Amino acid sequence: MTATNGPDTPANPPSPPPGSKLARRWWRRRWRWIAVILLVAIFHALLLRGLVRAPLPSLPGIAPPTPTISAILLPPPKPPAPPAPPAPPAPVRKPTPRPQPKPEPPAPAPPESAPALATTESGSTTAVAGAGGAGTAATPAPPAPPAEPPGPPAPSYSAPPSVVMHYASFVNGVQNPDGRITWEQDGQHYRLAVETRVLWFRFAFQSTGDMSNRGLSPTRYEEARRSKVEVARFDRAAGTVVFETRGGQVPMPPDFQDRFSVFLQIVGWARGDPKRYTTPGATESFNVADTREVEPMQVQYVGDEDVDIGTGMVRTKHFVRLPRHQNDKRRVEIWLAASLNWMPARLRQTEPDGTQIDLVYRSSDKH
């Protein structure tokens, strides 16, 4: 069968005559084919140079390429802060080894003919025989550690018997109405009252309290000057000094006395131990209260003196109260006589202005 050639695709198409429509159409077709061939050639050239990536057709049995996944890399998290190191354990103190006592050499055995002697605290001795009559002496006990030296012995106090004593009163040498000292005691309690007059003014002082083998323990002190009375109370259980009239209170110090019991305390010490006051300068220290305050006081033994009591001279021990502070110009003195049971033979107070008030013993009544 013979193929028929179409008018557009002749086997050897003849060149149309120039300038005709056919010639122009023919040249257009030529240029189109030439443009297509050029484009195909350029495309392949670019493909060969790798500038254009054309998708290849999928072939059976070959897996499609894995799609590319975009990933954003984040910075790694900061590592957590390391935990604080645990506190080091407290060092365990090793017990200090105690020094082992050196073994004492065995005591030499005493001869069989003379048993050991043990001395008691009272000074008596007793023989220590061996056990079972074997004739060996018992091992002596280790020696006791040396005792500490004893402190000074407590002063011995001896209260004078109850008495009422009368005194002539003088102010700057001029005689005034008589004064009086009343002392009462039953072995457990006491009462001391001192009364005097200066011109037409009456002064009275009274101390009451307890007694023991150590002396006086005042519990109440009273002062009456003219028509005014003031009181102080001493609570030893609570350890306080209470100023009842003026108000207020203070702690009670040791070695405590009131303004007048302090002198009867020295009286009892002189009675209990007269040798206590043989050397001038011996001083007693107290804390003394009146109705307003508590202050330290020192009473010093001056020496022995003779005092005229109207009926003769008596031997006395002279005591003086030392100044309580730098500007203390008041002076208080007392003379104690052994012939009066160591009660005062004379009392004198010198005021800052020089006024002297004297009480001199005249007589006494048993109470």
Image (spheres, rainbow, N blue to C red):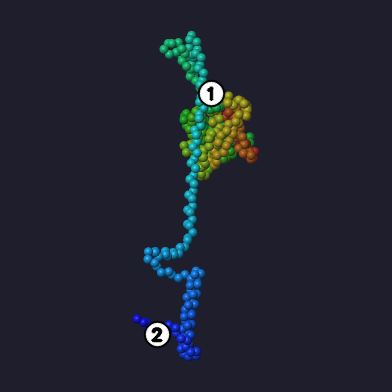
Q: Secondary structure at mark 1?
A: loop
> Along the line of sight, which residue is nearer the eye, 243 or 68?
68
Residue 209 lies, with reference to residue 17, above or below; the image says above
Residue type marked 2: Gly
Q: Position of residue 136 (x, y in %)?
A: 46, 12
> Along the line of sight, which residue is nearer the eye, 123 or 99?
99
Q: Position of residue 276 (x, y in %)?
A: 58, 26
Name the residue beneath numbered marker 1: 146
Q: Secondary structure at mark 2?
A: loop
For residue 171, say whether it is visible.
Answer: no
Dot label at residue 6: 2
In this rendering, position of residue 187 left or right of residue 152:
left
Residue 359 lies, with reference to residue 106, above or below; the image says below
Query: As drawn, which residue projects farthest toward the left?
Result: 1
In this rendering, position of residue 37 left or right of residue 335:
left
Seen at 53% across and 40% down, the residue is 291
